[in-house]
Image (cartoon, rainbow, N blue to C red):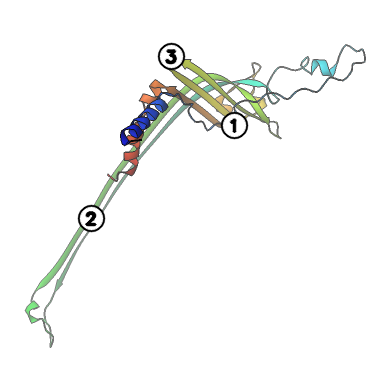
Amino acid sequence: MNTKTILGAALLALASAGCVTVTPPTSVHQPISVRPATPAAPAPTDGAIYSVGLSNGLLFEDRRARRVGDTLTIAILENTNASKKSATNTGRASNNNFGVTGLQGLPGKSFLGSTLGATSDFSFDGKGESTNNNVFTGTITVTVTEVLPNGNLLVSGEKQVGINQGSEYIRLSGIVNPIHLNAANTVFSTQVADARIEYRGSGAVAENQQTGWLTRFFLNVLPF
């Protein structure tokens, strides 16, 4: 197999890899969703109207999430603003003079009457400013993946929307206190502890917004 054949095969492999849509990585709690546990078989009834196994307590409770596999809705209301500004200005100057007036019994009399001087000057001026504004609103329904010993709910979920040649992913995970759930089984994202919220995309539009792998390589290795 000659060099041209190997090079052509490599270019074809790279082109094929670029056409494959890859799901963007995530940092939310895994797994994204779980199935509820299979309920135990109901105990035989004794002829009464009320049966614990059949009603499962829902006759006297609202349908808020409280068990693994239950779902709840999170209203995403994220609005963050941050700014930072700093300035530093320092300076230092020095001037030193040294004169040789006499050298008794030592060589180097040609230096008599000479004057040596040294001057140094240093200054530094640095400024920095950073501003960050983020707004993210929307809703997503997540699944309870674990019930913690104190009753809090570990939730995680994903919403995928396909638009033409690309896909949009909304992911969220965190810990929800059941007390914050309202009658509609909804909680605000600002009340979710350890929240991890992502909005990512894949497809042609998302790929064109990234630099090529060869460009990223040279950006990492070039010292200038």
Q: Earlier in the sequence, mark 2 or mark 3?
A: 2
Nearest to the observer: residue 53 or residue 91: 53
Of tags 1 and 2, which is closer to the observer? Answer: 1
Q: Which mark is residue 79?
A: none
Residue 192 quadrant: top right
Q: Secondary structure at mark 2?
A: strand
Residue at 64% across, 21% down: 71
Residue 110 quadrant: bottom left
- Across and down, in percent, residue 205 comes to 38, 21
For disc 2, the marked residue is 122
Q: Earlier in the sequence, mark 1 or mark 2?
A: 1
Query: Callout 1, which amino acid?
Result: Gln
Query: Callout 2, which amino acid?
Result: Phe
Residue 109 lies, with reference to residue 36, above or below; the image says below
Q: Secondary structure at mark 3?
A: loop
For disc 1, the marked residue is 30
Q: In the rendered image, which quarter contains the N terminus?
A: top left
- Across and down, in percent, residue 202 comes to 44, 23
Residue at 70% across, 17% down: 63
For disc 3, the marked residue is 164
Residue 205 lies, with reference to residue 6, above or below; the image says above
Residue at 79% across, 18% down: 57
Residue at 11% across, 71% down: 115
Distance from Cα at disc 3 to Cα at disc 1: 28 Å
Of tags 2 and 3, which is closer to the observer? Answer: 3
Distance from Cα at disc 1 to Cα at disc 2: 55 Å
Asked if marks 3 and 1 touch (Cβ < 8 Å), the reply is: no
Q: In the rendered image, which quarter contains the C terminus?
A: top left
Asked if marks 2 and 3 touch (Cβ < 8 Å), the reply is: no
